[in-house]
Amino acid sequence: MIIAIAQTNYHIGNFERNTEKIIATIAEAKRKGADLVVFPEITIGGYLAKDLFRYRSFLDACETSIEQIAASCVGIACIIGAPVRSKLTKGKQLYNAALFIVDGAVKDTVHKTLLPDYDVFDEYRYFEPNNTFKCVDYKGNRIALTICEDLWNEHFPSLYPQDPMIELAKQQPNIMINVAASPFSESHFEARCAVVTAHSKRHALPALYVNTIGAHADIIFDGRSLVFDEKAKLIDVLNPFAEDLRYYQLNGKELVARQLTTVYKEPESIVNIHEALVLGIKDFFAKSGFKKAILGLSGGIDSAVVAALACEALGSTNVMGVLMPSIYSTGHSVDDAMDLVGNLGCLHEVIPIKEATEAFDNMMAKAFKGKENDITEENIQARVRAIVLMAMSNKHGYILLNTSNKSEAAVGYGTLYGDMAGSLGVIGDVLKTKVYQLAHYINRNGIVIPENTITKAPSAELRPDQKDSDSLPEYNVLDAILHRYVELEMSSKEIIADGFDEVLVQRVIKLVVGSEFKRFQSPPILRVTRKAFGVGRAMPLVAKHPF
Amino acid sequence: MIIAIAQTNYHIGNFERNTEKIIATIAEAKRKGADLVVFPEITIGGYLAKDLFRYRSFLDACETSIEQIAASCVGIACIIGAPVRSKLTKGKQLYNAALFIVDGAVKDTVHKTLLPDYDVFDEYRYFEPNNTFKCVDYKGNRIALTICEDLWNEHFPSLYPQDPMIELAKQQPNIMINVAASPFSESHFEARCAVVTAHSKRHALPALYVNTIGAHADIIFDGRSLVFDEKAKLIDVLNPFAEDLRYYQLNGKELVARQLTTVYKEPESIVNIHEALVLGIKDFFAKSGFKKAILGLSGGIDSAVVAALACEALGSTNVMGVLMPSIYSTGHSVDDAMDLVGNLGCLHEVIPIKEATEAFDNMMAKAFKGKENDITEENIQARVRAIVLMAMSNKHGYILLNTSNKSEAAVGYGTLYGDMAGSLGVIGDVLKTKVYQLAHYINRNGIVIPENTITKAPSAELRPDQKDSDSLPEYNVLDAILHRYVELEMSSKEIIADGFDEVLVQRVIKLVVGSEFKRFQSPPILRVTRKAFGVGRAMPLVAKHPF
């Protein structure tokens, strides 16, 4: 039997486009002689459509799509993920299902057993879990078919007494297939490989792990579907961060690739982060129907890195950089930003903000009488810049990219409705020290980001001679603490036990806690770590955080 | 046996203050002769501390608090909700528990069986569910003790084969007690009464339903704990939207109130909404440590209603209204706003915005060359006002209240980083037609909100002679459609079948869908309906919504 893996990118809720692509892929696989083509989890509807699942119109559209796909499935079979209505009188209205379609109809339906509810996942909100197990038979083969977390049981409560693969293995399958929607984060690839290897080894079965690819605002799926032979040896890895369609020949338990395969070597972490961010920008624009991005260029490293990523994702003629010098901007800021514009070949405007900041000084004079200058005036500058950028966006149809990095988002070093504005937080999950790594990677084949931008001391330039280090600890120390507190969810005691200064740890955590209210109003942030700010980190707002 | 119900307001994570209050309440109940005092769900830690539950420091603090409370529990017993660590090697690390404490120690622990995961709830993210059932024995009484949704089983999947009350009833209890954290929404009180009545009647048991009270940013708990005798007759309702401590005498299954009770009459819906919003503001400020609020006063009804609510919650001398007329503001706008200020006795400033809007006109002239005036210039005005308000906030320590109503939030009739700014959305879950009802209710004892504010046609006044009805359908029709689409989650077909114009329904839903990205960056909104914008309505961002 020839099995094709269709690692596809879909647009949530865009049934017309998705269905057309699925049908075309099935036709292509059929032409190439495939007996079976396998698509990822909830390819119909899109993972995760969230509360759209609560609308009858959405579920009706899923059913129509299934009918259309089934009608095209003649002379070939497919396995595809879809939400399927339950007929229960109590409980959830849906299953997270994998459909086995052949001869124009759905022949078997497998329901997901282990429903994740951690970080960005919330499947238990929508789906009824499965508790019956049956393999899918086709052309003399018996397939142990599971859905994503069905292979990961350590997070799941005692409600789930069964390990789906152990139950299915009792029925003597000759292959295991898992349809997945497993998002990218640093080091998650290794975890996936380990999990699938363990099942393949334990049950002495070849394994296809079919992952989705594509970004949906915050969440980025990296593809890299996995293929193991019956000795649990990894024999193929599908494209990282790109669609793919590949073919495998199955004879009994013997699984071999039909195309040439090269040994996949996991690149350095920063390469994956770079690819993920580029895909994140690209899909955000493609799926929201926009082409052109705008961002403020300060001459600093954050905006330079975001500009370079945007040019790679959208093409440099679709990217507008706006220089908005104030009376505190240094000469080198404008020069560095102009060098960047030159290197990238993107559009630019220079719009000094002095006139507006002076207008606010005058307007507020009476209400501020007798008060010293303070952070208020710094915030006014940042907010004036946001008005300029949003005005450009409104007038010319650009989408504003936010350039805040994770370190400053964490400690609240940013102005709400000012530099925290934007439709997409491009590097909001990238700590400042990693932003430097990204800059070096972007410059790998020659200078794109000006050297001076990389080497000068970071500054918000909102008052004379300001440096980030006036208010914040050095970024290498700050980031090490933030990694532990935010990403590893360690308490202060545990961080201090790791060798960090007690006063500093307490101060940093206090800043993180004190800026929850700002992050609540952040744009969606491209997720590249195991714990990004956003829906995956749910914090109460008017709470005290004992740390 | 004398049982006290302690309907308490706590501050999430504020262990010092909460523990002190709990211990003082136990002492007070003991002085009044109580044998047992019952507190609501997760009174220790606070419902719902969300991802704080993932930090060891938080769970340690919960355990310390339990020890301190237990030490004070001598000569009296208490039942209190708390998160309790599980000792499982797999699954969730916590239980949502009710502790029975007597003689200085935790004697029994009941775990919650039915974990909600819908709307604002996400307990399955944190807690392991219960599957063993045992009543609590004390002074010759046997208590069927359950936790909140344990009484509500229709939403729960087939994973939960058992109805906790049926299991506990087999052990012949003489009373049922439910400790709850059930948030306010219109008409939810009746639903609670029906559920508790049904259990009381089915098992012929007196019932105490002990609810929490207090607001936590978006979610407002209304208290109104319920007391039923063994004939399922409602014999007492504790304070709405306020703390309370009341006593009941239990002999066998006979339960009587020790204090005078009056028959509780559910008031008109708008009265509850008013009380909920006042509590929401009050607790937001008290729990975040702020005293003073600021808001823009346009002369329109939304800002007038929010100003009146804020004055009631915080005292009029803690409320600052800022009038920010532009060249498009009509004379009556300023007059109406000044009348309101006079009626309320709050602080005010008048800060015209002409100078800043002109500055932006000049600054953008080159970049906008050849382009007509459009929505860009309207948005600049709204954003200039936000800068003024945030500058006042930064300089003087005011917290900005957002005045957007639910109708405009729904259709995106508002400016991101402009009138959508603020720390708390006070009426973001109140449809425009209900805002009028609120205004009339606020004026019940005399004019607070000027009549002209109520009677004039709504306008954003961002261009000459603008009226809301230029861009939007009449609010009574709009709100009827929004109620169905957003709150009842009906699809367009179903709404049209209810008698609404097809073109209009499609147009309204398109507006709602098209403004998801704006609402993503909204402040937290006080929830008063069954479906508010915010965490309880989880929508994908770059999705297509088939409607």
Image (cartoon, coloured by chain):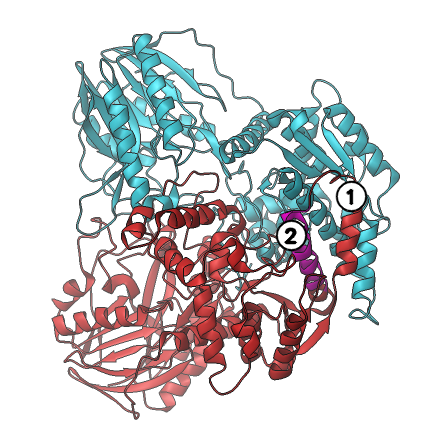
Chain colours: A red, B cyan
A379 magenta-colored: yes
Q: How many marks?
A: 2
Q: Tell me where residue B459 appears, x and y as whole percent.
A: 78, 44
In this rendering, is residue B298 above or below B44?
Answer: below
Q: Which residue is mark 1?
A: A365
Q: Amino acid at mark 2?
A: Asn
Q: Taking B431 as reference, is B357 left or right? A: right
In this rendering, is residue B259 above or below B36?
Answer: above
User: Mark 1, chain letter?
Assistant: A
In this rendering, is residue A517 above or below B16?
Answer: below
User: Mark 2, chain letter?
Assistant: A
- Quarter of image, res A273: bottom left
Residue B450 in sight: no
Q: Which residue is mark 2?
A: A379
Residue placed most toward the observer, B516 or A240 = A240
- The stretch in magenta equals A373-391
Q: Taking B293 as reference, is A305 left or right? A: left
